[in-house]
Amino acid sequence: MNENIFKINDKEYILPGNRACQGCGLSLAYRYILKALRENTIVAIPPSCLCVLHGLYPTTSVIVPALNTTFASNAASASGIVAGLDALGKGDITVLALSGDGGTYDIGIQSLSGAAERNTNFIFACYDNEAYMNTGTQRSGATPMGAITTTTPVLTKQEPKKDFLKIMEAHHIPYLATVSPAYPADLYEKFVKAKRIRGTRYIHIDTPCPPGWDYPTKDTVKIARLAVETGLFILFEIENDRFRFTGRSKIMAERGKLLPLVNYVERQGRFKKMSIEQLNSLQTSVNSRWNECLKRAEG
Amino acid sequence: MNDTRIITGNEAAALAVKLARPGVIAAYPITPQTSLAEKLSEYVERGDLKAEYVRVESEHSSLTVCISASAVGARVFTATSSNGLLYMHEQLHWAAGSRLPVVMCCVNRGVGAPWSIFNDQQDSFSQRDTGWIQIYCRDNQEILDTIIQAYRIAEEVYIPVMVCYDGFILSHTMMPVEVPDARMVKKFLPPYKPHTILSPDDPRTINPVFFPTRRENSEGILCDGYMEMRYKLQAAFEKSGEVIRSASREWAEITGRDHGGLIWEYMTEDAELILTGMGSIATEATLAADVLRAEGIRAGVVGIRAYRPFPKAEVAQAFKKATAIAVFEKCISYGYEGGVCSDLKAAFYGTDIKSPIHDYIAGLGGRDVKTGEIVDAARATLESTRAGDAGNKTVWLNCYTGLKDEG
Amino acid sequence: MENTDTNVSGVCTPAVGEAGRTGEWRDLRPVIDNTKCIPEVKGKPACFLCWLYCPEGVVSMTIPVKIDMDYCKGCGICAEECPPNAIKMVREEDADE
């Protein structure tokens, strides 16, 4: 990995002194997304942590053009940007819709599904911090089972995390991938690749959040790494329906074992009420999904 | 060369859009707008209209696509009705607050619950506070001419424009419509000049969170707070009346067709009894006025063409000589009264106009409003005024209300 | 109508410090021991995981490594990820200016 980091575009597109939290997983991921996509990009933003990172009037912290829209509509907003640019003969500009899990799994799902079904020529990336973080950590469809949120404060979230990657797979889009801020070179390469593909590209970003997940700010990269090493978050890409492990997950698939989930869970205060049953249920589903991926990679 | 065709209101709208040449169209089908959306997709797929047609999955998305396409610099169009308009409600506010010149047709239809597919004006009426210019059309010719004028108006004042016309009554009824020459329309509509363009050439973030207070930017310049942004929209509305009038005047000069400015008047110069309304019901009222004139009643009609901006000064002038006023409207602000009626009363406040105003709530959910009914209602209004009844009242026209006085 | 208003819809212009001098958020500040820092010791580009993992992008890929203390939020990721433990997080009050 060390050699790869020197190939990364060294320009910074996010200015210091921005409004993101200390140790924000989104900040780290967004740095590399913009390095990969570069200047000739327009970003569509829903109300979210990203909206706040971009800044409050009259100043923005990001040196890339961006358009705010309402919560449900980010994929539609991006669709309009794409259509407008095509109408004006500027279709070479990359359009990125970047939404949180709320704006992807829940309120944003309809417009995303519509845009993907139309094979809209844009990249839709979901930064998944597993709750509505911008408004103070309310549960979303992406919140894992057993997590404390402000709307699941006593009993923890009862339902498993929605399997959104399966939903996006069902749209049979040209490119689907997962990335993690613990592996910036892998993230960067995937966005560079996605930039060159036409049609709907979906990229899912594991996004640890210190205040929401309740861990010390210094551990963001460590927790993201543990998510991959436990198999909870798998680094892969699906290009034209063909599945392939990448990066650390590829190495683990070839010659490794999954670290037990407890290593991931015990570091985060949001899981302090997780029951043994919930942990076992999660471990079982992680194991079976890992085995399913191993089979797919062989086939 | 005169190109007159016998076409429906939806076809007239589609032709107008084709002439206005938007770069992006997004529409979701809903009765009775559907044939307009279908006609436009036919034009695009045949190559008659070069536009990106986004077949969105909901009305909320159709207006969203128009907003963002307009933000990158494209001229846009969408259309809807009834619950479709209601579904995109938050985007109506968003388009107006973004100050984008979106042009949208609202093919007026009653809203649920319960369901109605037939005409009334509650859909667009209930959106009057969102910051859109609203113009109501009398007939299919006016639909075509107004859509073209709408782009001129919207792109000058940077306020989105809703062109409203009655579902089925106009949208599906065939009338003669003269189609203007494409080159003439191109001259009437100069290219869209956005106030802000989203572009990598000058990276900015658009429509962020605003503070309540004005704040300094990095150069120490004091910048707008939320309230200043909203004030600017109202200030633009105050200029928009003149822009609407001059667009109509210029169109009249080149086509010979004058649909009026913010209002139009029919036989009002000596009218003692004035009927008023928006859209096709006002056209019906002109037929009623003819009948009343034949009876010896000096009846006239003031048609409200622009409902927003409300023609406050114009109505204070036009209704000056009336001794009785009958409003016929297909909408109501529940808990109060019909919208046109209360807006008129507010406009009259502080002037010398003291005549009784009778508010006839009519035609909800597509109930037919016959000329004879308008005649009888207006006559009754005048007679009760002459008999000394100076009060205002609201009457549900031809509606069973379970009250004792009904026939 | 001639439009001279550059803020017809809300438009933000890019600038550093949108949230102010975020260095003031810190309780702890990173201090680099250059005798342990790998690129410093090797005298050529190497490692730079501190640059890689800084969410703020305030660590420079230079020898010696420099961190912009006006805007470093003190998250501690650089110290946590540094392979030779060359970076320590020190209390602001105790750090030399």
Image (cartoon, coloured by chain):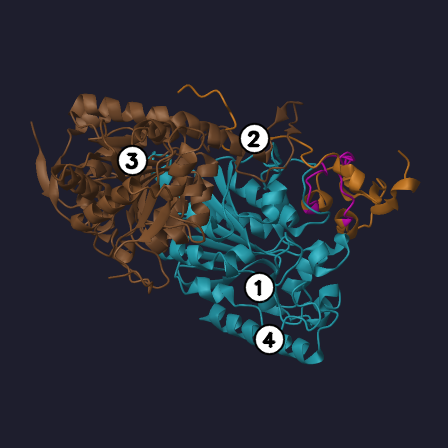
- The residue that mark 1 highlights is A142
Q: Compared with residue B49, is residue B167 higher up or lower down, i.e. above or below?
A: below
Is residue A81 visible to the viewer in this orientation of the structure?
Answer: no
Q: Are marks 3 and 1 on the same chain?
A: no
- The residue that mark 4 highlights is A287
Q: Amino acid at mark 4?
A: Asn
Looking at the rendered structure, the secondary structure element under dot 2 is helix
Viewer-nearest of discs 4 and 1: 1
Question: Spatial distance from mark 3 to mark 4, Cα to Cα?
Answer: 67 Å
Q: Amino acid at mark 2?
A: Glu
Question: Spatial distance from mark 3 to mark 1, Cα to Cα?
Answer: 50 Å
Callout 1 touching callout 2 (CB < 8 Å): no
Q: Compared with residue A111, is residue B292 higher up or lower down, i.e. above or below?
A: above
Please tell me the colour of chain A. Answer: cyan
Q: Residues within 10 Å of mark 3 (few under 14, many from 20)?
A: many
Question: Spatial distance from mark 4 to mark 1, Cα to Cα?
Answer: 19 Å
Residue in the image at 33% along x and 46% along y: B359
Question: Spatial distance from mark 2 to mark 3, Cα to Cα?
Answer: 29 Å
Q: Pointer 4 indicates a residue of which chain?
A: A
- In the picture, measured across the screen, residue B128 lies left or right of residue A270, that is left
Looking at the rendered structure, the secondary structure element under dot 1 is loop
Magenta span of residues: C53-76
Q: Amino acid at mark 1?
A: Ala
Position of residue B74 measured from the top left corner of the image (x, y, whole percent)? 36, 35
Residue in the image at 56% along x and 76% along y: A288
Is residue B150 visible to the viewer in this orientation of the structure?
Answer: yes
Callout 4 touching callout 1 (CB < 8 Å): no
The circle drawn on residue B228 is: 2
Q: Compared with residue B107, is residue C57 higher up or lower down, i.e. above or below?
A: above
Q: Residue B291 lies in magenta, yes or no?
A: no
The circle drawn on residue B204 is: none
